[in-house]
């Protein structure tokens, strides 16, 4: 299948970090969670080279980041090596580095995107066909459930609070606005600097299942450590996504989402969330169109062969601009030959998994354009 203009735009975005300006001479990489890796290198070899690098060992870091990146590099160039940031990322780099996520404002900061941690980010799409319902059959609630991830303690004044931080300050008399934390995490060591009592008052330990959230017309989506993991399944549903403008992006190209077309915008500090909800209730037809546009956006990522073609192009271009080299002993080289077959099997599973998602949720049809002529009722634009 030939690549579309959007596919070519995606390739340009994923590789944007290769073509940015060189960093200042005094710039130092944030080396936390960043490693060098061979395409077919064994886990034992990586463990030996980085024995104390990850506080809890390779563990989930290996399966979530390293192994998945290896799948793609072994597919294109089995003897190649690459630099990888094996974590949620907001850092800048001085050398081309494979990342799962990066700041939209830092597209030119040497981070090259690949679809890592893909199971966590895409698995929930499989549930949509089982538990979604038509837009008209949903209630009028705006709901959100999520963990206390992101910046809750501004020890660095250059950082903005996470949008999730402001959930603790929400006081709504409107029972149709239901915003709660489902998990309290990452608060150790900064309890004195966050409104812990307010956070606990907004804690719903039971949470809401995806099916329970999909009973509502409007879903609030808030970034955590980087992007909002749930954005894909929300946009694949018949509900309308309400969210602040994305600051981070992954393979899903969150930075390309257009307010009033793919989502209804709200202020980062949620200060106008009631106003936005009122607008949605008064403009349900437009909200339904926005939901359809979101589904159409998701559908652009569901053709497995297109995805593999784009991945191949990104990896090749990365290797053309990277000079990572690792000297492996002969025994490890021999082990890598055997490991190559396992990597190819995993890649085949990735291809089949993508095809399964496409079959499961079907073709997501686009709706019409949804750009409102007059903005919010008060004339105040949410950004």
Image (tube, rainbow, N blue to C red):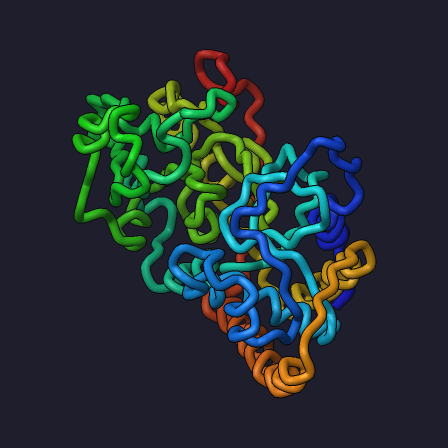
| Residue 304 occupies quadrant | bottom right
Q: Nearer the viewer, residue 85 or 219?
A: 85
Q: Can residue 197 be seen in this view?
A: yes
Is 7 above or below relative to 290? Answer: below
Up-down relation of residue 212 to residue 28 (above or below): below
The answer to which of 327 and 143 lies nearer the viewer is 327
101 w.r.t. 245: above or below: below
The quadrant in which residue 242 appears is top left
Residue 107, position as x, y percentages in the image: 68, 39
Q: How many labels does the image show?
A: 0
**Left or right position of 200 against 157:** left
Residue 222 left/right relative to 247: left
- Counting from the top left corner in percent of width and height, residue 150 is at 41, 37
User: Which residue is found at the position 25% from the left and 32% from the top?
Assistant: 176
Q: Residue 61 at x, y = what percent?
A: 47, 61
Residue 148 in the image, given as x and y percentages of width and height: 32, 38
Picture residue at 41% right of the left edge, 25% below the top:
155
Residue ID at (47%, 67%): 63
State whether residue 118 appears in this view: no
* Residue 378 located left or right of residue 27: left
- 79 over 209 or under it: above or below: below
- Out of 155 and 144, give the one closest to the viewer: 155
Q: Residue at x 34, y 64 (%)?
A: 130
In the picture, the quarter occupied by the N terminus is bottom right
């Amino acid at each position: 299948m030939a690549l579309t203009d959007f596919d070519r735009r995606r390739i340009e975005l994923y590789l944007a970090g290769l073509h940015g300006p060189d960093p200042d001479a005094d710039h130092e990489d944030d080396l936390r969670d960043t490693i060098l890796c061979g395409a077919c290198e064994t886990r034992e070899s990586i463990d030996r080279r980085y024995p104390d690098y990850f506080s809890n060992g390779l563990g989930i870091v290996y399966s979530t980041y390293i192994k998945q990146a290896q799948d793609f590099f072994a597919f294109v160039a089995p003897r190649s090596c690459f630099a990888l940031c094996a974590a949620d990322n907001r850092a800048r780099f001085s050398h081309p580095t494979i990342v799962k996520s990066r700041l939209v404002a830092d597209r030119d900061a040497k981070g090259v995107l690949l679809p890592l941690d893909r199971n966590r980010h895409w698995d929930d799409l499989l549930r949509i066909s089982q538990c979604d319902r038509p837009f008209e059959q949903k209630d009028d609630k705006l709901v959100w459930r999520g963990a206390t991830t992101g910046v809750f303690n501004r020890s660095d004044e250059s950082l903005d609070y996470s949008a999730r931080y402001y959930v603790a300050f929400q006081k709504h008399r409107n029972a149709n606005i239901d915003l709660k934390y489902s998990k309290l995490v990452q608060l150790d060591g900064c309890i004195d600097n966050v409104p812990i009592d307010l956070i606990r008052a907004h804690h719903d330990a039971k949470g809401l299942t995806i099916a329970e959230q999909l009973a509502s017309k409007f879903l609030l989506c808030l970034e955590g450590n980087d992007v909002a993991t749930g954005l894909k399944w929300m946009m694949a549903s018949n509900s309308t996504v309400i969210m602040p403008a994305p600051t981070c992006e992954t393979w899903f190209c969150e930075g390309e989402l257009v307010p009033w077309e793919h989502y209804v915008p709200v202020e980062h500090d949620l200060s106008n969330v009631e106003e936005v909800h009122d607008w949605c209730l008064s403009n349900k037809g437009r909200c339904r169109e926005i939901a359809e546009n979101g589904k159409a956006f998701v559908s652009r990522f569901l053709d497995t062969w297109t995805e593999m073609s784009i991945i191949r192009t990104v990896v090749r271009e990365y290797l053309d601009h990277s000079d990572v080299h690792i000297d492996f002993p002969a025994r490890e080289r021999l082990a890598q030959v055997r490991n190559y077959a396992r990597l190819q099997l995993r890649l085949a599973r990735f291809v089949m998994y993508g095809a399964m998602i496409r079959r499961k949720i079907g073709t997501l049809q686009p709706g019409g354009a949804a750009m409102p002529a007059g903005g919010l009722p008060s004339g105040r634009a949410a950004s």
